Image (tube, rainbow, N blue to C red):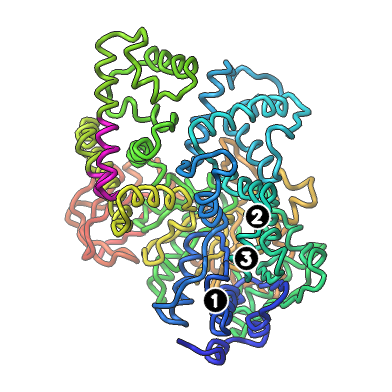
């Protein structure tokens, strides 16, 4: 176990000041790449080494991945047998509190956590019950009359601690939200479920209604640290301030220049007003950057300096100079993608970089389509963050719905999802009868199923429903003696899910089965827990996962992601695509100064992800949402001093064959393709030398030393040897 001097040994003076200031409020303004996680973890270790009990320490982060990294760093400093302080996300910490205390609010402790898919299904059901047709609205508000928009409005209200009783409409859409908000809350309560916003709001309600419960947790956690404080919403700030109210040993770390989540409720005033709320607070600035070269940092400083109402700071690095920044204009979005692919191939060939060292960032997820298509043609390994996520896949959602019903049969959303999985030939009429019965008796659909004999459902259907009830009851019994992983295997076998998936087609069925086997691998982490507890913990953990938690550090693949998803990450080589007005900055921000400032902060975040190389790309014209757009260059590009830009950008493009002529049409007839035949020996800049083993239309199969690759001849950089 390291002593206090050893904990401070490798920190810079500003970090030491942040680590050793233990008592009283502290604001650490931590620039991008300035080692804030290092400062935070060393501060916690320093608290423990100073004799403060780990039980008195609470550290809050924004992702489970960051929380796990923090725990590992603390163990590395203090030893694996150290008693760990409470470290987790706001949501996971709040879940811990609610599991112990929510009964004071008249709710049950075994509540479910509804994810966005569950919420949408619930709201769609409410729309149907209320006979609201999303397509029936007219005028400018047409697109607002849909479940997602209503849920977004409800979430926005909840993030401001506004409940259904205080929500005021004020417009046709607002009045619709005001009507559906209390219905939504009632349905959640009936299912004994909470959405993500409730996890925070219910804790605020607990603390404000029951001072003794608040005091209990104030006495539990005397020292509180909050990471990424610029991203907190009103509820998170309220929880933080209530917990810190008594002892005021509160350390918040963040960077107002990286506040980019206002659209999901984050309030930059929480960090800007910290000194106002805590007049005695000490402010420490972390400005030394350990990530990027000075060329990149000077560009970042110039970009963010254009924003007003900010705490001035200048990032600097000992990595002087570095490669100049490439600012490149392409003909269109396809040429933009081709350049990115070719440049990555060149970097991999000529330098000691790996695919995982490269990231492509964009403002809107729709931009990923063309880039992915080009990467597929080049055979480049890649992964899109923010696409169809593992836990959103149909087969995974189906299995999780079975597990949720086993844990809590009152979950109508999960119950309706699996009532016909696999197909039991239960039609809409039968479901409507069950829903009507549930409404009449005041119970959920589970009670209606158990009492289906009392309904007008045909006899054959009653037998099917009774078999389904017995299946769930049998699985509930197994939950008392089996861990989550074992229970999933039983669900697969007893519900005959594998046979159901295989009936959809062998390839599709195998893929779905493999995904569920991966789910079993995840569940196996909870095998050490007692039966029933294993399932509850597993469901709770996966419900709190975020996009960032699902990024595999060791996966050797190029990442494609939105700029919002990239926050907190770093890469040696960064490409930012689509730097044009109306795309980045986004069109809706151009008339609103506050939104435009947030867009500039988003660009600053993107630039500061880069360690060694930064490529800024724009197109003369771009097909976007079905329309050809010819937008001016992004106004943010003017903020970068010309001295930091590579003078040879245009020459480099020409040398590599870009920007002078249009790329060949991918749909060109076969006769216009390069002359290749089966048996030809060819060379590829990434895969090496290989032999053509098949040629069908414009697609060639080549046997390379690393395996067979399918490539499009119209685009693949192949040459005969």
From the image, tell me which residue sits under label 2: 212
Q: Is residue 109 magenta?
A: no
Residue in view at x 68 percent, y 37 percent: 163
Residue stretch in magenta: 471-489
Q: Nearer the viewer, residue 364 or 714?
A: 364
From the image, tell me which residue sits under label 3: 219
Q: Is residue 155 above or below residue 262?
A: above
Q: Residue furthest front?
A: 212
Q: CA distance from mark 1 to mark 3?
A: 12 Å
Callouts 2 and 3 close, C-beta under 8 Å = no
Q: Is residue 224 above or below residue 595?
A: below
Q: Helix, strand or loop at disc 1?
A: loop
Residue in view at x 63 percent, y 42 percent: 629
Q: Mark 2 or mark 1, which is nearer the start of the sequence?
A: 1
- Residue 685 appearing in the image: yes
Numbered circles on residues, count:
3
From the image, tell me which residue sits under label 1: 53
Q: Mark 3 or mark 1, which is nearer the start of the sequence?
A: 1
Question: Magenta-highlighted stretch: main secondary structure?
Answer: helix
């Amino acid at each position: 176990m390291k002593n206090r001097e050893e904990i401070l040994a490798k920190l810079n003076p500003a970090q030491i000041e942040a680590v050793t200031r233990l008592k009283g409020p502290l604001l650490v303004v931590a620039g991008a790449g300035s080692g804030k996680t290092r400062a935070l973890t060393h501060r916690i270790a320093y608290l423990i080494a100073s004799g403060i009990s780990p039980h008195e320490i609470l550290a809050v982060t924004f992702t489970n991945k960051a929380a796990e990294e923090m725990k590992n760093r603390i163990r590395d400093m203090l030893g694996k047998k150290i008693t760990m302080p409470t470290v987790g996300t706001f949501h996971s910490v709040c879940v811990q509190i609610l599991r112990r205390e929510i009964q004071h609010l008249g709710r049950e402790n075994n509540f479910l956590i509804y994810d966005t898919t569950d919420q949408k299904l619930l709201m769609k059901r409410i729309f149907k019950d209320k006979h609201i047709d999303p397509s029936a609205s007219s005028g400018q508000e047409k697109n607002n009359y849909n479940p997602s928009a209503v849920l977004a409005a409800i979430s926005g209200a909840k993030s401001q601690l506004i409940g259904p009783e205080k929500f005021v409409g004020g417009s046709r859409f607002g009045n619709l939200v005001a009507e559906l908000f209390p219905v939504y809350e009632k349905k959640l309560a009936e299912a004994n479920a909470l959405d993500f916003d409730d996890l925070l709001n219910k804790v605020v309600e607990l603390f404000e209604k029951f001072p003794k419960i608040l005091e209990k947790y104030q006495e539990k956690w005397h020292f509180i640290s909050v990471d990424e404080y610029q991203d907190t919403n009103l509820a998170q700030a309220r929880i933080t301030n209530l917990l810190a109210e008594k002892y005021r040993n509160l350390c918040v770390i963040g960077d107002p220049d990286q506040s980019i989540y206002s659209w999901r409720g984050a309030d930059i005033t929480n960090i800007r007003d910290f000194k106002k709320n805590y007049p005695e607070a000490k402010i420490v600035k972390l400005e030394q950057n350990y990530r990027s070269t000075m060329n990149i940092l000077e560009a970042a400083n110039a970009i963010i300096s254009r924003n007003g109402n900010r705490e001035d700071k200048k990032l600097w690095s000992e990595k002087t100079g570095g490669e100049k920044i490439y600012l490149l204009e392409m003909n269109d979005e396809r040429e933009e993608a081709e350049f990115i692919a070719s440049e990555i191939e060149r970097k991999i060939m000529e330098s000691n970089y790996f695919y995982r060292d490269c990231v492509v960032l964009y403002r809107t997820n729709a931009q990923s389509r063309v880039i992915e298509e080009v990467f597929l043609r080049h055979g480049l390994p890649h992964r899109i963050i923010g696409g169809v996520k593992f836990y959103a896949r149909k087969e995974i959602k189906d299995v999780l719905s079975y597990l949720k019903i086993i844990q809590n049969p009152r979950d109508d959303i999960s119950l309706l999802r699996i009532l016909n999985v696999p197909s039991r030939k239960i039609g809409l009429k039968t479901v409507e009868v069950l829903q009507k019965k549930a409404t009449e008796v005041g119970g959920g659909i589970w009670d209606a199923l158990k009492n289906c004999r009392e309904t007008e459902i045909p006899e054959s259907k009653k037998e099917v429903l009774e078999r389904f009830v017995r299946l769930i009851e049998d699985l509930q019994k197994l939950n008392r003696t089996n861990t989550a992983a074992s229970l999933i295997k039983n669900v697969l076998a007893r519900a005959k899910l594998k046979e159901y998936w295989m009936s959809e087609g062998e390839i599709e069925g195998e893929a779905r089965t493999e995904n569920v086997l991966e789910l079993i691998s995840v569940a196996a982490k909870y095998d050490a827990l007692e039966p029933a507890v294993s399932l509850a913990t597993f469901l709770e953990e996966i419900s709190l996962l975020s996009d960032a938690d699902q990024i595999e550090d060791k996966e050797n693949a190029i990442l494609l992601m939105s700029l919002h998803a990239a926050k907190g990450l770093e890469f040696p080589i960064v490409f930012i695509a689509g730097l044009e007005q109306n795309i980045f900055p986004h069109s809706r921000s151009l008339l609103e100064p506050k939104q435009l400032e947030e867009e500039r902060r988003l660009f600053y975040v993107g630039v500061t992800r880069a360690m060694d190389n930064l490529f800024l790309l724009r197109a003369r014209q771009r097909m976007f949402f079905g329309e050809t757009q010819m937008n001016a260059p992004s106004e943010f590009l003017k903020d970068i001093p010309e001295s930091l830009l590579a003078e040879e950008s245009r020459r480099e493009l020409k040398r590599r064959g870009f920007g002078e002529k249009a790329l060949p049409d991918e749909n060109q007839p076969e006769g216009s393709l390069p002359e290749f035949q089966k048996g030809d020996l060819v060379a590829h800049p990434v895969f090496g030398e290989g032999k053509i083993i098949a040629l069908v239309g414009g697609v060639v199969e080549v046997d390379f030393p690393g395996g067979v690759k399918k490539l499009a001849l119209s685009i693949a950089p192949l040459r005969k040897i």
